[in-house]
Image: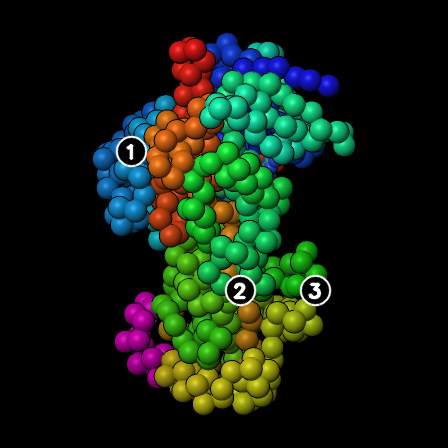
Amino acid sequence: MSYQTEVVVIGAGAAGFGAALTCVDAGKKVILLEKGDKVGGAGLFGAQGLFAVESCQQKADGSSFTVKDAYSELMNYTHYRSDPTITKAILEKSAETINWLGQHGLKTELVNNTQEVHQDHPKVYHQYIDKFAAFDYMVNYFKNSGGRLLTKTTASKLINEKGIISGVEIRRNQQTDIIKCQAVIVADGGYIGNSEMVKANLGIDSSNLYSMGERKATGDGIRMLAEIGADVKHLGTFENHAASVVSFQNPKWHNATIFTLTNLPFLWINREGSRFVNEAICYDFALWGNITYTMGGYYYFIIDQNTVDYLKNQTLNWTDSFERTFKSLQNQPVTHKVGPFPRIESDLNEAVEQHVAWKDNGLKGLATKLNIPYHILKANLDGYNQIVKTNEDTQFYKPAKYLQFPVSQGPFYAVRANSTSLGTIGGVKTNSKMQVLTANLKSISGAYVAGNNATGMYDTSYPTLEGISCSFAWNSGRIAGESAVQQLINL
Ligand SMILES: Cc1cc2nc3c(=O)[nH]c(=O)nc-3n(C[C@H](O)[C@H](O)[C@H](O)COP(=O)(O)OP(=O)(O)OC[C@H]3O[C@@H](n4cnc5c(N)ncnc54)[C@H](O)[C@@H]3O)c2cc1C
């Protein structure tokens, strides 16, 4: 079967829909390809909202946060290793994109920032109101506007004649077909689903990485663009996000008590047995993810029997770092309390059975089980207990409020938390029109890139501005769509 269209969009996630809807709104013929049987990608199953600055909602809320403020914050965060023109283009578009999304069925509400330490930062997080209904609406809108959606269809090759895009090879119903087109927008979500690529570009042993990202994002777009001469040297930025206790013998295993304990600033030690950070970093997910990555991909949180006994019966006046995220989705107030955990002992024992926790009556035994030198573990726990006693963390400056529990009474428990990623961000060199560039900074005619595939706004890690990755996806997708439309007008 042969197909003919003006624009092919590869990947029906956030960036792909941003691009495809922009093109059909301009009256262009579009085929949107989706590898899976459902649309949305991480932009639907994962994201709950997106960043914007100077939106109508922010103005109505009295916000004085400007594009200039956000620009400075991002450029400083990335040490000016991100691209200023791309960063500016995304930020400038972000407010209007909130209106545009609303017009295309995806309504949002401005909520308090969803992470604890961002409460003093101006509000930037525009939370999706009903994302599932919205994506259904967008599919219908796209089709009713003349767009063609091909699901269960994998883009496998870009056809580039004399430096100009002329088609896309696809795999569909176990057949290979060609779609002839004049422009292609590659928005297939990066490469977190490709274990070989992850292994090659990750700074830690990949067995320590837990991916929550889109499994179908297997780097096809990056590979296809590399084959036609794109600069894809910018791989290796991971959206590190918090840390997770993961059972590798049963990846679906979940225990609510263990989940909450992981989200609290107890004592953490690295694989050498040393304390390494102010554990209250758990209140900022990007920074928490980054420090876990820096420690080589995992750490242990350690509690003793006295702590277990306390948590069994009493409420603790700390905040589960994820509570605000979940409560803001339900429009409920945050309690700033956790526990009691009446089943904590059996929950910890379950974690031991899953090989994600270790328990021993003595520290020596625990050190042996964790394969770390006893003298290092002992020295670090002694040091921490002294910090708790004096109620002042002169080592890493954890607030006194969290210096409540010494670790001195066996049995001792160590629970392993792993580096966690929401996806890869970046790879393909582009400009502020989302045109694909070669290593010589020449644009490849007819080729555009967007979302997690595109390099431009990130440096080594995911910035702390809430909702920025989905914002980048929607906005870069829209810009890529506008650029493709302009190219067709200029023909
Ligand atoms: C659990 C989770 C929570 C998140 N929460 C947030 C949040 O609240 N706010 C935020 O800003 N960001 C969040 N993110 C990140 C955000 O979802 C992504 O940055 C964004 O979705 C990236 O958009 P994308 O279009 O590049 O990729 P995706 O949205 O993942 O879409 C890519 C699509 O391409 C398809 N595809 C892949 N290969 C091919 C191929 N060869 N041919 C055809 N189709 C293909 C995939 O199946 C997929 O549907 C979250 C991510 C996760 C995993």
**What secondary structure characterizes most of the magenta part?**
loop
Image x and y of residue 204, in percent: 49, 63
Q: Which mark is residue 45?
A: none
**Spatial distance from mark 2 to mark 3, Cα to Cα?**
18 Å
Image x and y of residue 10, in percent: 57, 29
Q: Can residue 340 be seen in this snapshot?
A: no
Q: Which quadrant, please, contains the C terminus? A: top left
Q: With respect to residue 137, does 386 lie above or below?
A: below
* Mark 3 lies within 8 Å of ligand 1 (Cβ measured): no
Residue bearing the label numbered 1: 85
Instruction: Provide the residue span drawn in magenta.
Output: 385-399
SS at mark 2 in the image: loop
Dot 2 or dot 3: first in sequence order is 2
Residue bearing the label numbered 3: 249
| Amino acid on which the number 2 mark rests in the picture | Asp
| Amino acid on which the number 1 mark rests in the picture | Thr
Classed neighbour count for the residue bearing mark 2: other residues with Cα under 10 Å, few (<14), some (14–19), many (≥20): few
| Amino acid on which the number 3 mark rests in the picture | Gln
* Mark 2 lies within 8 Å of ligand 1 (Cβ measured): no
